[in-house]
Image (spheres, rainbow, N blue to C red):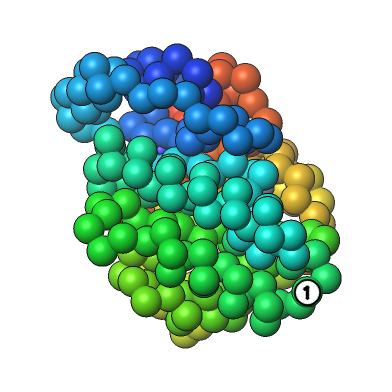
Amino acid sequence: MLHIGCHLSAAKGFLHMGQEALSLGADTFQFFTRNPRGGSAKEISQQDVDNFLDFSCFHHFSTLLAHAPYTINPCSDNPQTREFAEMAFADDLKRMEYIPHNLYNFHPGSHVGQGSEVAVTLISALLNKVLDRNQTTTVLLETMSGKGSEIGSTFEELRAIIDHVELSDKLGICLDTCHVYSAGYDIVNDLDGVLEKFDRQIGLNRLKAIHLNDSMTPFASHKDRHEKIGQGTIGTDAVIRLINHPTLKHLPFLLETPNEPEGYAREIKFLRNNYNS
Ligand code: FE
Ligand code: FE
Ligand code: ZN
């Protein structure tokens, strides 16, 4: 069974997202925990959560992926920005417990000239403050393309962050196919080699989700431009090999392709049709 979904708007609550996902042929979805470009979070309704949990259980939904807002930068050089990141992160993790045992994904951030080492220290310090022994959520660091001063475009950097976190059993990785390809990991011609590297440098047991995107820009471009499945530089064949790879095929795949709902439904159908169960 291919576990696949796409990014949905959280504006109308959990049950609405579940229903929308189901109508698109999905059995999982991704959503922003709060305004992606601002900071405010909507009040969670216990009734909506209860309705959704029944619904997702009935329809055998897979693990969900919540995405932190883009505005948090845990390794900013501005203490106020880091404080906001900590506040939003801690609040999000509290809210995630309404829907226990799911995944919370964040961008490690941009070091804005401070260098990778300082950034790793700041990001792990934030994680050491907000992670709680009793949380059921697994926090995922997203693999990034390395645009600007972005952290997390190498497996080594991600490993270094994990190594500095006390409750590292709460941490995993979300691999974004557009980002890793742009970062210089050749998932088109050498998927096995990339996964071997991942295993050596991070450990495949940390890999918990895939952001499934094609890319508008060439290999190792260090750009971050998502493309529809099969219409970019990664291509259909590589995507089909990816969803069927024995190491990956059981993970939740989340589309972040530039699509309207009908486009997502088409991509989900296409990928289900090309999945060997
Ligand atoms: Fe992301
Ligand atoms: Fe992504
Ligand atoms: Zn991206």
Residue shown at 43% from the left, 69% from the top: 128
Identity, as a three-letter code, of the amino acid under mark 1: Gln
Residue shown at 79% from the left, 59% from the top: 147
Residues 139 and 4: in front is 139
Residue 18 percent coordinates (x, y): 35, 22
Q: Callout 1: helix, strand or loop?
A: loop
Residue 209 percent coordinates (x, y): 43, 53
Quadrant in which residue 142 is drawn = bottom right
Residue shown at 43% from the left, 75% from the top: 165
Q: Is residue 260 visible?
A: yes
Instruction: Classify 184 as above or below 45.
Output: below
Instruction: Classify 143 as above or below 117.
Output: above
Residue 56 percent coordinates (x, y): 24, 27
- The residue to which callout 1 is attached is 114
Instruction: Classify 271 as above or below 235.
Output: above
Residues 1 and 142: in front is 142
Residue shown at 66% from the left, 64% from the top: 75
**Viewed as shown, does residue 50 lie left or right of 102?**
left
Q: Is residue 207 visible?
A: no
Residues 24 and 54: in front is 54
**Viewed as shown, does residue 72 lie left or right of 12?**
right
